[in-house]
Amino acid sequence: MSRELVATLEVKRAAFTVAVDIAVPSGGCVALLGPNGSGKSTVLGALAGLVPLTAGAVRVGDRVLDGDAHMPPDRRRVTLLEQKPRLFPHLSVADNIAFGPIAQGTPRREALALAREWLRRIGLSDVGRRRPERLSGGQQQRVAIARALAAEPDVLLLDEPFAALDATSAPIIRRLLADELSRTGTTCVLVTHDLSDAWQWASRCIVLDAGRVVEDAAPAHIVASPATPFSAALAGYSVIHGRWADGTVITDDHVIPGDAGGDVRDGDPVFGAVAPRDVGFGESGVVADRVRAVSVRAGRAYVEGESGLVAEAPVTVDLPTAGQSVWLTPHRMIVRRASVQPRSSESRTA
Ligand SMILES: Nc1ncnc2c1ncn2[C@@H]1O[C@H](COP(=O)(O)OP(=O)(O)OP(=O)(O)O)[C@@H](O)[C@H]1O
């Protein structure tokens, strides 16, 4: 049975409009990324049937969820898992997990046996009779995952499911969810602010800005060659904004050489993406800068200039301090037009 998700969404929320096409192959995962307020949760709400479409259609396999008619959320076999577990407070943990199967017609005794099996799988066998309020946040999120998957949805929508978890719970829950998604072959859309999660889970990343798709590419492509300032910053590059002229990016204060694609013309607004490892610093160089901050991580130092450039260096060298003048030299800067249309060469499908 195919669980391919194909959606063409248009949603208007007051002055805000989302217009997005999404296709996720059966059992696959697509990541939705974008700045705050770009429309990611609205897209998930629309797919779940919680936010009405102004126009468009949603299909999973051969089942039409939106189009000529609107299928209500509880019949769509599409489950939304958010940052907060949102368990039913008046039901026991086991009854929370059994809720979906019972609603779908599974006899109560059988559904509770299923819930016990899920509790064993998530390492919480001894808490089935408790109310959710007596569990920690991480335990509640594990139960929320079990409740979501026990209902055997065709599509699981994940809205930053790891964001509220501590450093101990997060990897356990990541692993649990990854195992269960691959075991059950559930199709998945993941909203995240973490490119590592997108890299690990998704075959494609769709980047939204102001309700429209501005980038649609494989995670590896976004890491190597980000097409928007947002994804460049997400991938760990320093981002410089300016205008392109004579092989350089001209900012208010600096002139920085870069490598632009053929579609960039003199005078175009552009952004440059520079990896810290590609920036040197010293007493002479390309950009006369002032040190904003110096940080140290895993034996490497990061010298951040007021220009926005960051230089990586060994901690053994004589490091400058904040406020000190320094010359920064970017050896390689990817330059792209600042307002990017969706990549026409990339298919919208995953
Ligand atoms: N119930 C609502 N009524 C009207 N407008 C709304 C409603 N919910 C969200 N919006 C607007 O829709 C836009 C997109 O919001 P949305 O929550 O989808 O963004 P997001 O990308 O998920 O943001 P974040 O990363 O902060 O969670 C915002 O401008 C927001 O103000």
Image: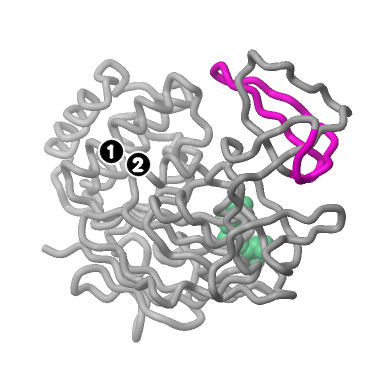
Residue 159 placement, left or right of 107: right
Q: Residues within 10 Å of mark 2 (few under 14, many from 20)?
A: few
Quadrant for ligand 1?
bottom right
Task: Determine the secondary structure under disc 2.
Answer: helix
What is the x, y in percent for residue 110? Answer: 12, 38
What is the x, y in percent for residue 235? Answer: 53, 45
**Residue at which label 1 appears:** 178
SS assignment for the magenta stretch, majority? strand
Q: Is residue 204 above or below residue 287?
A: below
Magenta residue span: 284-308
Q: Please, which residue is most extreme toward the bottom here?
A: 68
**Residue at which label 2 appears:** 200
Question: Nearest the camera: 135 or 257?
Answer: 257
Q: Are marks 2 and 1 in contact (CB under 8 Å)?
A: yes
Mark 2–mark 1 distance (CA, rounded to whole Å): 9 Å
Residue 295 placement, left or right of 112: right
The residue positioned 28% from the left and 66% from the top of the image is 5
Task: Determine the secondary structure under disc 1.
Answer: helix
Amino acid under label 2? Gln
Question: Nearest the camera: 299 or 106?
Answer: 299
| Among numbered discs 2 and 1, the one appearing first in the sequence | 1
What is the x, y in percent for residue 151? Answer: 24, 48
The residue positioned 51% from the left and 56% from the top of the image is 226
What is the x, y in percent for residue 222? Answer: 46, 54
The residue positioned 48% from the left and 47% from the top of the image is 192
